[in-house]
Image (cartoon, rainbow, N blue to C red):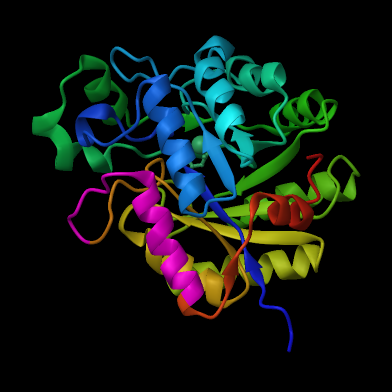
Amino acid sequence: MAKPRKTIITCAVTGAIHTPSMSEYLPVTPAEIAEAAIGAAEAGAAVIHLHARNPQDGRPDQTPEAFEPFLRVIKQRSDCVVNITTGGAPTMSIEERVRPAATWKPEVASLNMGTMNFGLFPMLARFEGKLRHEWERDYLANRDIVFRNTFGDIEHILTTLGANGTRFEFECYDSAHLYNLKHFFDAGLVKGPLFIQTVFGLMGGIGAHPEDVMHMKRTADRLFGDNYRWSVLGAGKNQMAVAAMAAAMGGHVRVGLEDSLWNGPGRLARTNAEQVTRARQIIEGLGLEIATPDEAREILALKG
Ligand SMILES: C[C@H](N)CC(=O)CC(=O)O
Ligand SMILES: [Zn+2]
């Protein structure tokens, strides 16, 4: 009897897209981020994707010091795979964005595979009346956000962090980003298995229709064959549908309040663990098993 395939659940616990006034359940302080990460790991997430925030007003904070308090607690209480963002907030400089991962040398760091328009403004209408902080309104109303990830920026992050043995969660928001990754793969600047996180339904990137999911998978299969491990994240209301489609096709899944505030239509997720549990139910419902952190390390060939 063939061993059931293992599915890696990644949980992105707070991010830099959503803002505190949107949901009282969005982790902001180091203690809240640590609790959210450990809760998500206990619920079944093998990989935890981390951003930091200013504890007072929840503004994205990409200083290495802001990460230290929760990284220490997570390391003490969990064997989960730590994945530190290099995306930060799309309004930050590359130097600012790469600093935390360069300082803390995690097993995994995110790496965004192309420059793109980054549309947060569609959320403004929905949360306009609830926004407590001036920075939230300015941030969400900004229609000119360019999320910069040039070939030079990507190579800089690859070489800076690669030197520490850190491997990458390659964020691909459109098929062009898969071709950008292919360029670095052919140039020998990245080694397989590639952990490719295909992002669906974020304004400025590809949509979240099943055809979009199939298009990204077919393109990745053609470009990388079995030199990659496919994972998906669906933004907002698309989160669980995209996760279910991918899991059924052998893909890994990412959930968490960075990507969606919801746990079912119109119901705010009270914890990241709630979303991990919902994804786990879908995966186990398909007769699959979730991967432990060590199984994820093996599947992704991490330094451990
Ligand atoms: C859509 C997600 N925000 C992708 C992400 O997590 C980017 C990063 O942190 O580098
Ligand atoms: Zn992120």
Total count of labels: 0
Instruction: State yes or no: residue 277 in magenta.
Output: yes
Figure check: 13 above or below 280: above
Residue 274 is situated, as x and y percent measured from the top left of the image, at 34, 53
Q: Can the viewer see residue 213 in this picture?
A: yes
Residue 198 is situated, as x and y percent measured from the top left of the image, at 57, 55
* Residue at left offset 41%, top offset 40%: 258
Q: Nearer the viewer, residue 118 or 60?
A: 60
Image quarter of residue 271? top left
Instruction: State yes or no: residue 276 in magenta.
Output: yes
Q: Quadrant of the N terminus?
A: bottom right
Figure check: 89 above or below 95: below
Residue 152 is situated, as x and y percent measured from the top left of the image, at 74, 28
Instruction: Give the left or right position of residue 3, taking residue 258 as reference.
Output: right
Residue 18 is situated, as x and y percent measured from the top left of the image, at 33, 35
Instruction: Give the left or right position of residue 169, taking residue 28 as reference.
Output: right
* Residue at left offset 51%, top offset 55%: 44
Residues rendered magenta in the picture: 265-284
Instruction: Give the left or right position of residue 46, taking residue 237 as reference.
Output: right
* Residue at left offset 34%, top offset 15%: 55
* Residue at left offset 41%, top offset 33%: 35
Q: Quadrant of the C terminus?
A: top right
Name the residue at the front extreme.
77
Figure check: 278 above or below 142: below
Look at the magenta stretch and give its main secondary structure.
helix
Q: Can the viewer see residue 62 in this picture?
A: no
Q: Nearer the viewer, residue 4 or 98?
A: 4
